[in-house]
Image (cartoon, rainbow, N blue to C red):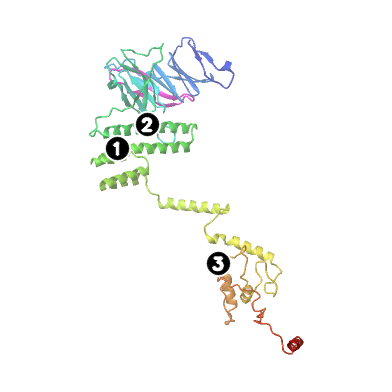
Amino acid sequence: GSQVHFHRFETFGRIADKDWNVTLPDGERALGCATGIGWGAVITSRRFLRLFTISGIQGPVQWIPGEPVTVVGRDRFVAVFYHRSTSPMQDGTQLLGYSIMDGITGATVAMGEVSALSPGASLSWVGFTDKCALSVMDSDGMLSMLARYSNGSTGSANDGNWMPMLDTLGMKKSTSDAFWPVEVYGGKLVCVPLRGGKDHPDATRRPVTTTLSLRIPLATALSVKSGPLEEGSVRATFALNQDKVLSDYLVSQGDANEDEIEEEYAQKCNQVDKVTLKLFGSVVQSGKVERGYDLVQRLHSEKSYDIAIQMADRIGHRKLSDRIDELRLRKFPPLDEEEEEEEAFDDAATFESGMQRGQRSDNVDDYEPVIATRQQRMEQLTRGISPEKEGAFTPGQRRPRNHDAEELSEGGYSTTDEESLPRESLKRKFDEDSHHEAPSTNKKRINPFAKKKMESPAKGIMKVVGSPTKLSLSRSSTFSTKSRQKQRSGKQIV
């Protein structure tokens, strides 16, 4: 039988064990091979599909439904093409089938007929896009892709339908020109242009590649401006569906994070909705309101529906905006009362758990237990000291300096800045004290929140004696008598 040699570019083991060889049973020939991430596949003349790991461990061996034509792979997927019938159709079109499988597990992902061949044409190239969408090109130069649609987060999808994505017949400068496909990447076909009737590039020289943008062959639009937008909207929706199929499958296999995939998908939906909204604005401005309503059904997010309603109102189509609003309510129904109650209950539970963890609350009543605890600590500190006893004061009180201060200390309201009581506690305390002091009606009621009138503590105690304007001696003093006698004797001498 044939011998299969597998060459790896890198390994974390020994270099000597990097490459490996296997020999097929006697009489079995290898007809094609393909490789991907973590696997290798070989189709043989016995209609076998043999799977291997990259280290050389043999996997499942599966039957191919018909005579094998070719095999191709990318990432986790391997696709096998086979003949569904030994004789072609009356016009010469080949009857082919395909089967897409997981190259690691061998599970069948999708299978069906290859209906993407022009009348009388044959299969010339197959491959996967960068989003793992299966693509084929026939001998007439028509490039087609398999459009699959996801069934949700289960990772399953239907077999799909084939869609023409690019007709290279109109891009040829002469009938003898052709395009040699290399791959489909980023919405473009990477190929090698062939001139002069050549069937393949020259193997002795490095080929020069070119890119052709994909363009679905739609019918001619009524408006020249809306033609490219219409084609772009259809192609963008197709690409979004294929990306969703790949993402759901990777999530189901555990190879991708579901939260990250959902976030990326939401961003891509917004980008696709931008293209659809541009086409919607162009169609509505031309007065085609029914076409605008059909385009709105392609939108994905509720925000895009709101934008479409605003655009319709701005242009003046009230009926269209009402219909779009009804469609939005059907696609994004409002929350029921039970759901709102459940959300309110969840919010209350979250709030209660946050308070138990010591988070701050904006409600003043929530801080009352803390204040009561601080008052208890103050009572423990002042235990054994009577505030009513004359000359004894609590740590939270100041010594009175005037009559007002004495009355304030008797009421027990003076506290330090560090241990100031809350307003509600002070009010309750004030009401209790005023209730006890009700018999003494002549006593003045004190407002604890009024500004204190501060006076000098020495006022009323010390009397300052005014200084005389002029000093004088009494006439009966001895000093005055002697002074007058000297003045007289002085006059007599003179």
Magenta residues?
98-125
Q: CA distance from mark 2 to mark 3?
A: 66 Å
Q: What is the x, y in percent for residue 296?
A: 31, 40
For residue 285: magenta? no
Residue in the picture at 67% in, 72% down:
387
- Give, as a three-letter code, the residue at label 3: Glu
Which quadrant would residue 176 be assigned to in this image?
Answer: top left
Residue in the picture at 63% in, 77% down:
403
Q: Quick one: SS at disc 3?
A: helix
For residue 113: magenta? yes
The residue identified by callout 2 is: 239
Which quadrant would residue 432 be assigned to in this image?
Answer: bottom right
Q: CA distance from mark 1 to mark 3?
A: 64 Å
Q: Is residue 229 left or right of residue 448?
A: left
Q: Nearer the viewer, residue 343 or 434?
A: 434
Label 1–label 3 contact, CB within 8 A: no
Q: Which mark is residue 424?
A: 3
Q: Is residue 20 visible?
A: yes
Q: Is residue 157 visible?
A: no
The quarter of the rendered structure image containing the C terminus is bottom right
Q: Which mark is residue 279?
A: 1
**In this view, the mark in front (2 or 3):** 3
- Disc 2 or 1, which lies upstream in sequence? 2
Q: Is residue 178 above or below residue 427?
A: above
Q: Quick one: SS at disc 1?
A: helix
